[in-house]
Amino acid sequence: MSTSKFKTICVFCGSNLGKQKSYQDVAIDLGKELVMKNINLLYGGGNIGLMGLISQTVFNGEVKPVENMHQRKAEMTHNADAFIAIPGGYGTLEELFEVITWAQLGIHNKPVGLLNSNGYYNSLLSFIDQAVEEGFINPSARHIIVCASNAKQLIQKLEDYYPCHEQVSSKLNWNYEQLEHSEKKKCKFNLNM
Ligand SMILES: C/C(=C\CNc1ncnc2c1ncn2[C@@H]1O[C@H](COP(=O)(O)O)[C@@H](O)[C@H]1O)CO
């Protein structure tokens, strides 16, 4: 069993299974990768859809009852070392954008990964690029999202990204352009820019 920089990763994922088997495969693959790297899974708590699949793959773990959605999200954000979104619907998107927004505001400095299985998130990523082009998303904040098409690669990227991420967010509140040259170089490498 290998180890990771992350003790706990929070996964946002669909309460539906999706129409293609590849979406189910990605939930199972991510679950296996977490087990292999000895990383705890934190997730919404439902036993349906991709949520159910990933939790069955990882464990029959502790269930912590919460009062409401807000408390659940606060617990998830507080207790995770990193976040990963896999395919899902409105709930998944809402959770993903919330942690991105909080990273942008400097509320947390935990890495955020997007598991773009089967190109599921291609159109979302194109939209975000358009929002950057149109001046609504800061180019430095575009790089809050770390993408990969498989679980192993994504966790590796998030681990590589970790020190650089802390540098960017704590020193400069995500203003990449103001980084020292040496820091920029390191970020370019880590963020695949
Ligand atoms: C209470 C039960 C099922 C109700 N469904 C959910 N339970 C827990 N978490 C959920 C549930 N539905 C959505 N979520 C959260 O949103 C994400 C999935 O939403 P999507 O719209 O399907 O993308 C997921 O990450 C959850 O955190 C009985 O178990």
Image (cartoon, helix red, strand yellow):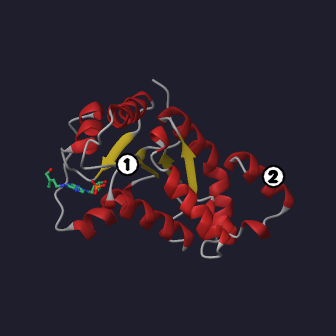
Amino acid at circle 2 = Lys
Estimate how packed mark 1 is, as few (under 14), some (14 to 19) or many (20 or more) residues with alpha carbons within 10 Å.
many
The residue labelled by disc 1 is 11
Quadrant of the image for the N terminus?
top left
Amino acid at circle 1 = Val
Residue name at image x 61 percent, y 62 percent: 129
Res. 185 mark: 2
Coordinates of residue 9 in the picture (x, y in percent): 41, 47
Cα–Cα span, label 1 and label 2: 30 Å
Residue name at image x 29 percent, y 42 percent: 18
From what the image shows, is residue 137 above or below residue 23?
Answer: below
Compare marks 1 and 2 and give the one earlier in the sequence.
Answer: 1
Label 1 beta carbon less than 8 Å to ligand 1: yes
Q: Is residue 170 visible?
A: no
Res. 150 mark: none
Viewer-proximal residue, 124 or 24? Answer: 124
